[in-house]
Every structure is written in structure tokens, then in C-alpha cells.
Amino acid sequence: MTDAPFYAFVNARLVDPVQERDEIGGLLIQGDRIVDSGPDIIIPDETETLDCTGLTLLPGLVDMQVFTGEPGEEHRETLATVSRAAAAGGVTNLAMMPNTSPVIDDAALVDYVLRRARATSIVRIHPMAAITKNCDGTHMSEFGLLQEAGAVAFTDGDKAVMNALTMRRALSYAANFDALIMQHAMDADLQSAGVMHEGELATRLGLAGIPVAAETAIIDRDLRLVELTGARYHIAQISAADSVATIRAAKARGLKVSCSVSATHLMLNENDVESYRTFAKLNPPLRSEGDRLALVDGIADGTIDVVVSGHNPQDAEAKRQTFAQSAYGTVGVETLLAGLLTLHHADGLELKSLLATVTSRPAELLGLEAGSLEAGNKADFSLVDLDAPWIVDADNLRSKSKNAAIDGRKLQGVVEACYVSGKRVFDLGGQK
């Protein structure tokens, strides 16, 4: 039994999808754990109390797709800088992609990342490991040892496993460990030299296009392999209406398939590339407005399980190129919540169900103790002013790189404070 003092957060709007809760109430914590939450918490004597009137108290967010620069490319992002950006966005757990230098394809590297995270990060960082050695798509990694070392899922990051036999073997192997396989659905051959969505705008800009079929071809193939192996399969990001329809049908057939979409793809479309904005060069690309609306519908009906930041920091030189030559990617971990809230403010989607896509669902897929305000859970949460307006200024974001596709975008929803294991790791007032 801990002797740590109690702290109570009262008069907040509590939103917790796991408990089906959206009501005014309080949160009681002791040490690093939640003791109670709800409208009628009992506050012990000598408890320090914080009045949260006007604020919403949310479970800590779980970002399921974050690229970093460390190890190997610390000029792009370090574990320390990405953790500060995450905390400022209410993200308390993030899953780190294995595309580092060296690639995370060995148990020793998983252990290294976990040790570095404990030493330098103010949020929890969970490494994913590569499906294939060096993400080369050929030789499989040792899933059992990697999972034992702490890898929470397996992915080749921003590369698809192109060889069907290798993918079948990976899914079969993963099924033995109940491990999650995450695929980047982009056929490299169909993508070829493409750099944006294939369509009239790409033709007008003189840029090579990426057809929707480059995405759906991988999804269609992999769903057959999932049916064959019974493995758990997750599509890292989808971008097109056809993909939403395909996944909806696969779920109706009972396949163990799930998918993510980035908050950026829910807000922007191909027109944001029109002035050759390299910050809007993403992989998968921003597609048509019809595709964007289909993604929003996929969130609304539960076809899309998770919303991610797709955080992929690139330094100024990597983006200060011609559009065709510039690097893919946008920062986004700090703006994930505010981006998601656009679907609540502008499209009228229910806050509680939206919140599940960045809390309980990714936590469940990754096997993390996170994403809920239930008693006994780790005291990871944030205090948010849901209606506070602000304008994204890339230069003021806490990521080391400043390549924000939504730079200049007007958003609503400001994180006032973020707590990890009951410790305040971000305070807007103190700019911690």
C-alpha cells in the first residue's frame, strides 16, 4: 500500500470511451495510479484539490505511428524532443516506428530504445520492430525474441513488404505469438516515380501521380493472406474511399483486420499541394476531397479503428527541394488531438467515440495498459480546453523539425496540462 499523497481533479468534464463516460466529475489519483473517477468520487482528508471548471479531462492519448530520428538521425528528432511535442499534445504513449539508423530489427536495439526512452523521454515510448531485416522485404526478423525484448508490433515502417511469400510467412509466424503485423499499403511498383495523388491536378502541376490502386493492390493481396493465416493485421494508414470500402467488407467477413488514418488526411486534400507545398508531400498522398470525406465516414461508422499523427520529422534541407525531390512526411504528434477535434467541431462527430480512436483502440491493438480513466490504471491524462482557438505556427511547435503540413491552419482545442504516472509533464501556463 503506497503512502503517496492523494490528488483530486474536480469539476471537470470527464470523457472516457472505455467507461462510456461523458459527464461532469472528478479524478482521484495516488502516486502513479488512478484511485477513482466519476461524478461521485470520495475525496480523503488532506487531499490537494485542483478545480478544473471549464476543462475536459481526457485519458492520455496513444499515438500508434511516430517516426523519430534517434538513433542515427538526431538532427531530425530525438526521443527527448518528440516526447516534449507529444506531452504538449496530450499524448502519453507513442509507438515508435523501426525505420531508424540502424533499423530496429534486433532485440538489443529494442532494449537500447527502451533504455534511452527511460533516460530522456517524459512520455512512454514503445518501439516497434521491423518485419524484415533492415526493412529490406526479404529476410524475416526474429519475432519471438523481439517481442520478448519489448517490441509492441512489427512493421517495415514506410515500406511495404512487397514479396507475397515473405508476407505470408510473416503473418503465419506472427499468429503464433498473437503479434500485430502493421503494413504500409503502397505498392512500390505502382507508385513508381509518383509523388502525389494521380488525377487532374497532378497532370496540371506536371507531377507524376500515385494511383489509388497502389494502395488497394497491397490491401487486397494481404487480406487474402490474413484469411489464410488467421493473423492480426493492421494497415498503417489508408487514404482512399476504395480502401475504406474494402476494409469494411473484410471486417464484415470476420477477418482480424484493423486500420489507421492520419489526422492530416482527415483535414487536408490534394488541393493543399497545389502551390507545390512540400510540407504537404505525404506517403500515402493527400487524395481527392471525395476520398477525404470517405475517410471521415469511415471514422464515423467504426470502419477506421485508429487515428494517428503519422509524425515524420524532416529537416529544412530535406523539404527545401523541388516537390519531386523533397522528402515525404509531416510532423503531427503535437497537433494530433486538435486535428481530431476538427471532426467534432466541424463535422459533429461524437467526442467519446472519436476519442476512442486515439486512446482505447490503439492501446488494445498494441497490448498497452493505457487509454482509460478506470481505477487502477496508470494516472496518464490531460486537461484540455476543447473550444480554445489557435493557429498552427510550425516555428512554435516543439518538434525539432518544423515540417507541418497544417501550418497556418485554424484549430480548436488546447492542452492545458498533461500528466504521466501522476506527474505533470506539460503545463501550458508554465510552458514546461
Image (tube, rainbow, N blue to C red):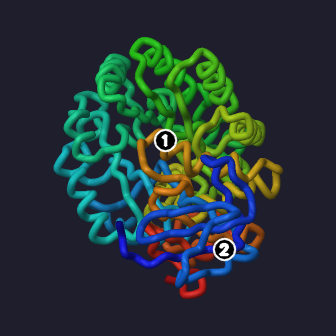
**View extreme (bottom): residue:** 430
- The residue nearer to you, when weighing 15 against 248, is 15
Q: Which residue is mark 1?
A: 364
Which numbered tag is attached to residue 344? none
Where residue 230 appears, x then y in whole percent? 42, 18
Report how far apart the C-alphas of labels 2 and 1 lie in the structure: 28 Å
Q: Which residue is mark 2?
A: 10
Image quarter in which the N terminus is found:
bottom left
In the displayed structure, 223 sits above or below 129; it is: above
Q: In which image quadrant can residue 128 be found? A: top left
Query: How many numbered badges does the structure rendering display?
Result: 2
- The residue nearer to you, when weighing 419 against 215, is 419
- Between disc 2 and disc 1, the foreground one is 2
In the displayed structure, 365 sits above or below 49; it is: above
Where residue 281 appears, x then y in whole percent? 57, 51
In the displayed structure, 113 sits above or below 216; it is: below
Disc 1 marks a residue whose amino acid type is Glu
Disc 2 marks a residue whose amino acid type is Val
Please say if the residues under marks 2 and 1 sit with CB atoms less than 8 Å apart.
no
Identified at 58% across, 37% down, the residue is 238
Identified at 33% across, 17% down, the residue is 165
- The secondary element bearing badge 2 is classed as strand
Residue 321 seen by the camera = yes
